[in-house]
Image (cartoon, grey):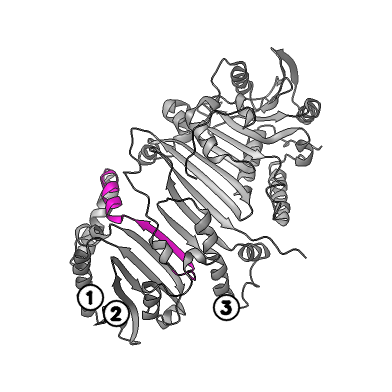
Amino acid sequence: MQVQLHSRLRPLSLTLMAVGSSWLLGSCQLRGPQVQLTGDVLPETALVPQSAPLVLTFSTQPEESFRTHPDLLAQWESWTAEALAETGKEFSREEMQAWAGEQFTMAVVIPNLVPGAAEPVPGILFGASTRNADLSGQFLAQVRQQAAAEGANFEQRQEQGVTLYVQTNGEPGERWVTAEFGNRFVAVANDPRVMQQAIAVYRGEAEPIGRSESFRTAVGDLYKSGTLAFAYFNFQALQEDPESFKDWMQDLDPATLGSLQPLRSLAMAAHWQEQGLRLRMLTQTDPKTQVQGGWQPARGELIQRLPGNALAVLTTQQIAQRWQAVMPELEKDPPVKESLEELRAEFRANTRLDLEKDLLAWMDGEMALLVAPDAQAHPLLQGMGAALVIETSQKDKANAALTQLDRLAQESGVGVTEAGGQVTWADPLFNRPLLTRAWEGNYLIVTSSTAALQTLAQRQGNLLPQTEPLKTLYDQLPKPNYGYFLLNWQGIRTVLEATLPGGLAGLEPEARELLTRIDGLGITSYPAGDHAFGLELLVTVPPKPQR
């Protein structure tokens, strides 16, 4: 095993942070019952105090996760090697794998070791459970040997079953400590004060982060077998001890700081599964704050009638209710309130309509916006089309607003015709339809051509829930939810290859590889209890064919 420390000791703290961040970036259901952390779930967090603002864990055994995509395991290793080379610290994951548990953990324990310094110096703890105390002890010895070669002096200490080697020289944040907690854990800290907190937690003199209800909930919801990376941001620690974080927050304006007040925690976990990369996030909020504003999950009926050849799909619901819910909070900010008033005034001047009462008020159901190939769309769109579908319980109010928009279009020279329940706006220059609209029950459908309108209204062809690659995204993302954002990357790639000179051949190899491998991307947010909501991202990547 090779352990190489940076030529200057202070950047070693940045080394640990950079290594963790790189692993997290490289890796980049509805809420289950709350769980007590058992001994085999993130065991090394038994060293992390409950007040830690940031906890990161990274898998030491990603091979099984990448079983169906062995070529991407090599890419994972390449990312890791590059990240370690940039920070000046190198070690063999395979050798660490010989003694470490399923993951290693990094935590910011002390927000700033040097209050008032030009830049905050975080107190960082690096910990892992060990399956072989001899091998993990050798690893720590090599860390100390390399540090000694750079001028560090270490003193051995024994504190109630914990073997410590403490650097006796150096500045705060540069005084390294290694610790062996019997045959259970090993740890490295960049300052003795950090390790003392870990020891206090280990002895039961301070509460571990595993006693935090928010942390337990996040782990229970997000941390599954095969998790590549897990991150927990403890905003409650910031609320309870703002003085410790003031050097981190000095560049943030009051409005931004105020927006953090309702947050208790943000957690995320990255998984590589057979379908591809899945990133799950859970945001927990102050029970006294109604961040979600009483929003209800979408019924999920509209997305089931959308065409399967769509390239991009965005669905949401209850625009009217959500607008009313967020306006009081937004208008507390004077610049935002001024911008909203300007928007309302400009909209009224241009349309003679009230933005909220005449337009948004009737958008009280589901809504979808999509982009799809459309050979009959306007020539300037080059074979691409779009559609907007709005569900409403107030058709009369909607028709009144649409009639006013028709009148304005005619005043601007646009040809407006109505036939068979369809209204068409035509471009006077090309005499081609710009858009066509019609009602299908309570759904207002606005499209780029009559053909696209018929496809949506009559549900012609293959629908989204039955057509890959959108089918996998639709099937795998959690339900019920607040809406979807879906990209048919397979279809987008086909369009790019047809429209770009030389197709994708002119792109950089890495970009071409990325564009070629991905089939689809989907994002959704969903309720996760009364005071939490989740967000999930899924990137589908089919395995390479075996030769």
Task: Please give the range of residues in magenta.
Answer: 307-332
Q: Is residue 83 left or right of residue 53?
A: right
- List x then y, in percent, for residue 245: 47, 30
> Circle 2: is it few (<14), some (14-19), or many (20+) Cα within 10 Å?
many
For residue 425, which quarter of the picture?
bottom left
Please state, as top left, top right, bottom left or bottom right, where the N terminus lies in the image: top right
* Residue 432: numbered disc: none
| Residue type at numbered disc 3 | Ala
Residue 493 lies, with reference to residue 117, above or below; the image says: below
The reply to whether callout 2 and callout 3 are in contact (CB within 8 Å) is no
Q: Which residue is mark 3?
A: 498
Q: Which residue is mark 2?
A: 425
Give whichever of discs 1 and 2 has the lower sequence position: 1
Numbered disc 1: secondary structure? helix
Residue 20 lies, with reference to residue 382, above or below; the image says: above
What is the CA distance from the residue labelled 2 to the residue labelled 3?
A: 29 Å
> Circle 1: is it few (<14), some (14-19), or many (20+) Cα within 10 Å?
some
Q: Which residue is mark 1?
A: 406
